[in-house]
Amino acid sequence: MKLIAASLILALTAPLAHAFPWYASGNNIRGAQLMTDQERQAYVARLQTMKTLPECQAYWEGHNKEIDVRAAEQHVNLPPVQGNPCQVMVLMGRIK
């Protein structure tokens, strides 16, 4: 019975386990084309160290503001903000 329960939990959470790594590749960040490889890697690494939703939200919102400034300076039109990596991490149980 424990094996069945463990298998069920694994089956239900497996899709979530892939959600963040897809985002964490660095290429799926809004404004990634305005960032260096090192900046994308540092951004993802920093996101993964977040412990609370408010901390994560503040960092993510700051990133979006910075990217908006870069986009304006370089005359690049970015899509509107969609998705929220902090909410994904809450759903995955990575932050509270």
Image (cartoon, grey):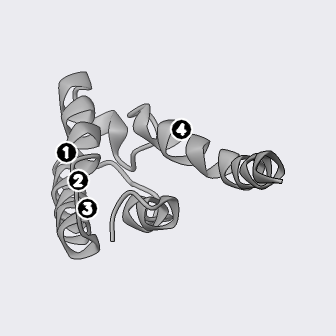
Q: Quadrant of residue 81?
A: bottom left
Q: Amino acid at mark 1?
A: Arg
**Which is nearer the N-term, disc 3 or disc 1?**
1
Identified at 38% across, 34% down, the residue is: 26
Secondary-structure class at tag 1: helix
Query: Are circles 4 and 1 on residues that touch, CB within 8 Å?
Result: no
- Badge 2 element: helix
| Side of 1 relative to 37 (left or right) | right
C-alpha distance separating marks 1 and 2: 16 Å
Q: CA distance from mark 4 to mark 1?
A: 16 Å
Residue that label 2 marks:
67
Tags 1 and 2 in contact by the CB under 8 Å rule? no
Residue 10 at x, y percent in the picture: 70, 47
Q: Is residue 74 left or right of residue 20?
A: left
Q: Are marks 3 and 1 in contact (CB under 8 Å)?
A: no
Sequence-wise first label, 3 or 4: 4
As measured in the structure, the alpha-carbon distance from the residue carrying label 2 to the one carrying label 4 is 20 Å
Identity, as a three-letter code, of the amino acid under mark 2: Ile
Q: Quadrant of the C terminus?
A: bottom left
Residue 35 visible? The answer is no
Residue marked by disc 1 = 46
Residue wearing tag 4: 22
The residue that disc 3 covers is 60
